[in-house]
């Protein structure tokens, strides 16, 4: 691990965090997770019906992938805090992806409830990875609250619209003291590469892989894109120029 | 008396505990968590937790998502 992602003191060799939602079945999901190389993957908390088994947790356990419970579906800080506490009890992890959305049309984070929930969970000892708007002011406030990672969206969940405001992401990265994870909106590999080129520390995606025609192949593409974007960021790109600049010597 | 587990009304014996109600409902040995009237109850304290009529119990587990 020569360039690990470090969140709350914990190292990850992969900078691709995946979700498990949207996969048509567990065997498709398994192949996609393996192809992605991910070490951290989100799960949701829902009612356990009397008959149901813990299929997805068993799968992640078998693959050695750490589950990251989310608070998807929560609309208020209070709901999110309860869901996080239930996840901690059920999964034995104090890590949580905090997600508090405002409405069904946009699934955009509710900034007021998000910040309130983050404060409560940090106070309760959680390692909070906060899913947030691409707002540099809110990102800073979440970091100041004690979030272990700040995860701005590229565009709304599930849209595949990519990164709609790259400059905001750059501003968030420029003054961040915790890892920035581009979360939501990724459609294809170039979006993931761009996130890393903008300086994000990792990418979190689900739908772009699980609902692709070939999830396993798209997972491999995302893995390569995250690696390529990270390399390019570190390599230092050339400045953009208005006029051409010859790369061959002048004719004799 | 009746309690509500995951939105379903269920009859349990008078003075029954959370452990009794959950054994009757059927919960997995691991990977689940329980909230009683909006607060988490750790598994170790289920047997000592008495239920009142109309208690609202939520049993959650991890599913595909996010």
Image (cartoon, grey):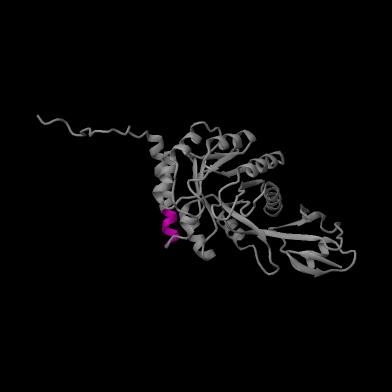
Q: Please indicate, yes or no, whether residue A249 appears anywhere in the rendered image.
A: yes
The magenta segment is A214-220
Vertical side of B39 occupied by A120: above or below: above
Residue A111: where, in percent of width, then height? 60, 42
Percent x, y for residue A126? Answer: 67, 43
User: x and y percent of residue A140 in the render?
Assistant: 57, 34
The residue at 37%/33% (across/down) is: A236
Look at 63% across and 47% down and name the residue there. Answer: A96
Task: Classify the position of the C terminus of chain A by image quarter.
Answer: top left
Whether residue A176 is in magenta: the answer is no
Return the x and y of residue B59 as percentages of the image width and height: 72, 60
Q: Main secondary structure of the magenta part?
A: helix
Q: Is residue A215 magenta?
A: yes
* Residue occupying image coordinates x 47% and y 38%: A168
Please name whichever residue, B40 or A115, is drawn nearer the observer in this view of the structure: A115
Image position of A176 (left or right of A90): left
Res A127 quadrant in image: top right
Q: Is residue A28 above or below residue A81?
A: below
């Amino acid at each position: 691990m020569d360039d690990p992602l470090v969140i709350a003191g914990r190292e990850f060799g992969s900078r691709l965090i995946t979700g498990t939602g949207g996969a048509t079945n567990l065997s498709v999901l398994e192949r996609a997770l393996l192809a992605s190389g991910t070490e951290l993957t989100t799960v949701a908390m829902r009612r356990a019906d009397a008959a149901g088994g813990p299929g997805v947790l068993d799968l992640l356990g078998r693959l050695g992938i750490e589950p990251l419970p989310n608070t998807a579906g929560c609309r208020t800080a209070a709901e999110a805090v309860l869901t996080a506490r239930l996840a901690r009890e059920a999964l034995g992890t104090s890590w949580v992806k905090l997600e508090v959305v405002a409405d069904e049309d946009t699934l955009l984070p509710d900034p007021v409830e998000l910040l309130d929930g983050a404060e409560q969970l940090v106070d309760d000892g959680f390692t909070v990875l906060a899913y947030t708007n691409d707002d540099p002011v809110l990102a800073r406030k979440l970091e100041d609250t004690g979030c272990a990672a700040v995860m701005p969206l590229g565009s709304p969940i599930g849209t595949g619209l990519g990164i709609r405001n790259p400059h905001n992401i750059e501003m968030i990265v420029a003054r961040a003291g915790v890892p920035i994870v581009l979360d939501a909106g990724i459609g294809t590999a170039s979006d993931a590469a761009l996130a890393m080129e903008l300086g994000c520390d990792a990418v979190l995606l689900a739908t772009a892989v699980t609902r692709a025609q070939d999830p396993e192949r798209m997972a491999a593409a995302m893995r390569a894109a995250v690696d390529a974007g990270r390399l390019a960021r570190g390599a230092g790109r050339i400045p953009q120029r208005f006029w051409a600049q010859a790369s061959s010597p002048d004719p004799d | 008396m009746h309690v509500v587990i995951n939105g379903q009304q269920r009859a349990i014996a008078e003075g029954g505990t959370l452990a009794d109600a959950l054994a009757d409902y059927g919960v997995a040995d691991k990977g689940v968590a329980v909230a009683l009237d909006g607060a988490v109850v750790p598994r170790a304290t289920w047997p000592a937790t008495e239920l009142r009529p109309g208690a609202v119990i939520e049993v959650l587990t991890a599913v595909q998502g996010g």
